[in-house]
Amino acid sequence: MKRAAAFVLLLATTAAAPLRADIYAYRDARGVTHFTNVPTDTRYHLILRTPTEMAAAAIASPAGWQRRAAAYHGTIERAAAAATLQSDLVHAVIAVESGFDPRAVSPKGGMGLMQLMPATAKRYGAADPFDPEQNIRAGTRYLGELLVRFDRNVELALAAYNAGEGAVERNGRQIPPYDETRRYVPSVLKVMAALKARRRPG
């Protein structure tokens, strides 16, 4: 119970900080779990990542995630084709959601590359949401269904992916007035546009 209380306190203090709010943890030989937002030991592993920070990093410093993305290119291409999606869109969503970290977990419980919520993972057959292939396949199917639901409107589909389709519907099929969602949608679109621009000749 003390460890849980310490974690809540740490999360509250780091979330209020203007810098990083990612949370790392490791369990020592005595079974005590240690938490930090500034890992100084190789035993620490990421357990919570700040989505807005990931969005900023995806736009400002693409080199890191682009190197990691290469390992998943084939899986993304196949999943995007099956869901009738542009692969650049899927790449952009993953870049902003997790920075291509297959072990990423968000404060809200999103898991893996496409930050699947538990119910979404179950709904689309991702028994292990940290398995990259299962995660990409499930997340891409979900995103594809959102595009169909919102008449191929990419902005609304992305808003629904971030905030839930119910939130978009309740707001008159408009982007909900949530700060995170209103940052998330243009962040994904910017990354997607950058990916498209890289492939243009000349």
Image (tube, rainbow, N blue to C red):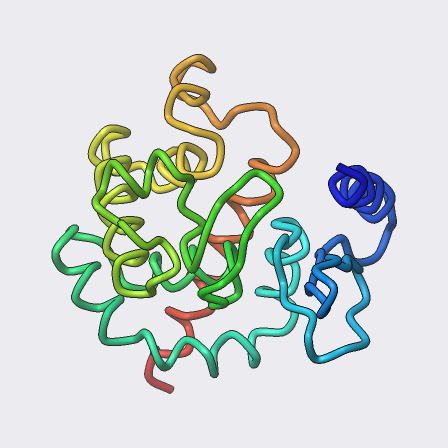
| Count of numbered tags | 0
- Answer left or right for 129 relative to 42: left
Q: Is residue 7 above or below residue 153?
A: below
Position in image of residue 137 (x %, y %): 23, 56
Position in image of residue 180 (x %, y %): 62, 37
Which of the pair 90/110 is nearer the observer?
110
Q: Quadrant of the C terminus?
A: bottom left
Q: Quadrant of residue 91?
A: bottom left
Q: Residue at x 57, y 79 (%)?
A: 64
Position in image of residue 192 (x %, y %): 42, 61
Q: Is residue 85 above or below residue 167?
A: below
Q: Residue at x 79, y 60 (%)?
A: 37
- Answer left or right for 49 relative to 5: left
Position in image of residue 119 (x %, y %): 35, 34
Which of the pair 78/40 is nearer the observer?
40
Q: Quadrant of residue 20?
A: bottom right
Q: Residue at x 19, y 60 (%)?
A: 79
Q: Quadrant of the N terminus?
A: top right
Q: Is residue 77 above or below residue 170?
A: below
Q: Residue at x 20, y 34 (%)?
A: 148
- Answer left or right for 5 relative to 162: right
Which residue of the protein is positioned furthest toward the bottom in this rendering?
202
Which of the pair 186/146 is nearer the observer?
146
